[in-house]
Image (spheres, rainbow, N blue to C red):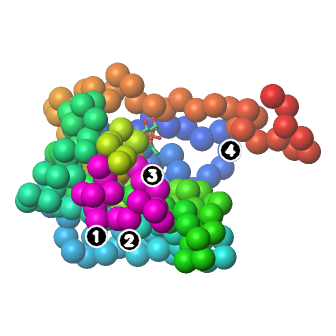
């Protein structure tokens, strides 16, 4: 596998655009820095995502290197500390769940998920790898990112970078658990009514 090879063994049963099966979350990253243009493209894609009343409740706070990145890394669970610090960019994701009138924004997490997926697919098209991570200190993330607790929920973190090579320890690790498996489509989509 080369550093830009996004191919995997995923096969779709129905016809879909290749980007859906070509995206996957490797744990192997190189240290290659992202350019300002690449970073701009990632957030450009995210900010076109749909949202309820066009509220765009997502907030992404990112760090690349230096002391601030060390602070970001300190939020990681032990498992995620094994690979995520390798990635040249880490993003903390927040959803604004309370609006200016103090009203709950019910679909904020859903909308933020749409923005993350846009970013992930854009990254994949650029030959980059992403991995979402719920395994972070959700409370400490507010202080590290300077995001107010009363209006936002911490959702997760994301690491982005160039996919590592076969030789990388973490690549071998992920091969053991490639997460290719999916529920069948009939277990998640139902005509007329849900059959549990
Ligand atoms: C919100 C979210 C949280 C996740 N948390 C973690 C995590 O803490 N650690 C980890 O190694 N992977 C994490 N993952 C990656 C998932 O395990 C991975 O997306 C899943 O196994 C499907 O694999 P794929 O992304 O390659 O399709 C997370 C993914 C998402 C979307």
Evaluate if marks 1 and 2 touch, with contact meaning CB atoms under 8 Å apart: yes
Looking at the rendering, the quadrant in which ligand 1 lies is top left
Residue at the spot 51% in from the left edge and 46% down from the top edge: 21
Per the image, the residue denoted by label 3 is 155
Circle nearer the viewer, 4 or 2:
2
N-terminal of the pair, mark 4 or mark 2, is 4
Q: CA distance from mark 3 to mark 1?
A: 20 Å
Residue at the spot 27% in from the left edge and 58% down from the top edge: 143
Specify whether residue 35 is in view: yes
Q: CA distance from mark 4 to mark 2?
A: 30 Å
Q: Is mark 3 within 8 Å of ligand 1?
A: yes
Evaluate if marks 4 and 2 touch, with contact meaning CB atoms under 8 Å apart: no
* Callout 1 secondary element: helix
Per the image, the residue denoted by label 4 is 14
Per the image, the residue denoted by label 1 is 39
Q: CA distance from mark 3 to mark 4?
A: 31 Å
Residue at the spot 27% in from the left edge and 26% down from the top edge: 173
N-terminal of the pair, mark 3 or mark 2, is 2
Q: Which mark is residue 43?
A: 2
Direction right: furthest residue: 192
Q: CA distance from mark 1 to mark 4?
A: 33 Å
């Amino acid at each position: 596998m080369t550093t830009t090879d996004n191919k995997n063994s995923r096969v779709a049963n129905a016809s879909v655009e290749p980007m859906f099966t070509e995206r996957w979350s490797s744990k192997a990253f190189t240290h290659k820095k992202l350019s300002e243009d690449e970073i701009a493209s990632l957030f450009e894609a995210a900010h076109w995502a749909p949202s309820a009343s066009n509220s765009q409740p997502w907030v992404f706070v990112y760090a690349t290197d230096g002391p601030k990145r060390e602070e970001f890394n300190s939020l990681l669970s032990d498992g995620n500390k094994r690979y995520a610090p390798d990635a040249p960019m880490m993003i903390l994701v927040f959803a604004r769940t309370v609006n200016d009138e103090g009203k709950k924004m019910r679909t904020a997490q859903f909308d933020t998920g749409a923005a993350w997926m846009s970013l992930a697919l854009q990254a994949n098209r650029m030959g980059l790898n992403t991995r979402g991570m719920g395994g972070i200190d959700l409370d400490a993330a507010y202080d590290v990112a300077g995001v107010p607790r009363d209006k936002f929920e911490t959702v997760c973190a994301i690491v982005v970078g160039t996919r590592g090579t076969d030789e990388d320890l973490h690549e071998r690790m992920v091969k053991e658990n490639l997460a290719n498996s999916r529920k069948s489509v009939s277990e998640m989509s139902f005509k007329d009514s849900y059959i549990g």
